[in-house]
């Protein structure tokens, strides 16, 4: 049976689109059961609606506290049967309470080569630091910020005249390959997590 994933977003949703495009092309054997956004005006919600995928909006400001916010997101994912939670441009840090409901079943895409440049504006951090390569990382989420076991990384050059935006655009092209690839590995049952290491079976 096709495995179900839930995608959690905050904005543009180009990574969600990359997942949907690969599903449509028949190269990613999963079903997006629900898209959850913490912003009601996220472009990602329109992308989901075009594919007739159920959407749920949970705004932080409409919740009494972070526990209620996360409980509602987790409830939406579980009620739609999501077996894997994919954070695709979700701009909030999740607490242990949420993470423990989906052990090793939450993936995040981060626009830097972790463990460098965690948190926000990772591409700007890379330009400011003067590194010569950067890229993206898909990892399982643990209780730290961008610290969980790494599944896959892709590298791009950093050019002398790069700005945060130009580097972000170059990295984004790789994100659109990396995230569907990691999800495919998961769907094919090829990922094993041992401590910090993720092993990918051939
Ligand atoms: C992507 O670059 C993603 O890596 C980044 O936000 C962008 C979302 O783009 N995520 C983070 O920085 C998480 N800390 P998208 O909405 O078009 O997929």
Image (cartoon, grey):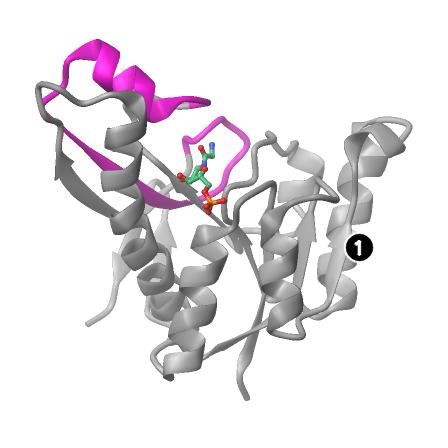
Q: Would residue 137 appear left or right of 100 to someone viewing this image?
A: left
Point 44% across, 76% down: residue: 23
Q: Residue furthest bottom?
A: 1
Using the image as rendered, state which of residue 78 and residue 51 is in the foreground: 51
The answer to whether residue 114 is seen in the rendering is no
Q: Quadrant of residue 139?
A: top left
Point 75% across, 44% down: residue: 40
Q: Give the percent coordinates (x, y) of residue 75.
A: 80, 55
In magenta, the rendered stretch is: 119-147
Q: Quadrant of the C terminus?
A: bottom left
Reading the image, the residue beneath label 1 is: 75
Q: Would residue 46 appear left or right of 21 to someone viewing this image?
A: right
Point 59% across, 53% down: residue: 44
The answer to whether residue 150 is seen in the rendering is yes
Q: Quadrant of the N terminus?
A: bottom right
- Decide: is 64 above or below 201: above
Q: Quadrant of residue 18?
A: bottom left
């Amino acid at each position: 049976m096709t495995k179900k994933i839930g995608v959690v977003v905050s904005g543009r949703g180009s990574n969600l689109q990359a997942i949907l495009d690969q599903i449509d092309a028949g190269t990613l054997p999963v079903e997006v059961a629900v898209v959850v956004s913490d912003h009601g005006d996220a472009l990602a919600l329109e992308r989901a609606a075009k594919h007739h995928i159920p959407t749920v909006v949970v705004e932080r400001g409409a919740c009494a506290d972070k526990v209620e916010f996360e409980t509602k997101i987790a409830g939406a994912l579980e009620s739609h049967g999501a077996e894997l939670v994919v954070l695709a441009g979700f701009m909030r840090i999740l607490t242990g309470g949420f993470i423990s409901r989906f052990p090793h079943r939450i993936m995040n895409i981060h626009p830097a080569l972790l463990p460098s440049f965690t948190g926000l504006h990772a591409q700007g951090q890379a330009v400011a630091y003067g590194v010569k390569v950067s890229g993206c990382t898909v990892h399982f989420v643990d209780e730290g910020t961008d610290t969980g076991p790494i599944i896959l990384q892709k590298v791009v050059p950093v050019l002398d005249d790069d700005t945060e935006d130009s580097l972000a655009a170059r990295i984004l092209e790789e994100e659109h390959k990396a995230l569907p690839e990691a999800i495919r590995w998961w769907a094919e049952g090829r990922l094993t997590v041992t401590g910090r290491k993720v092993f990918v079976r051939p």
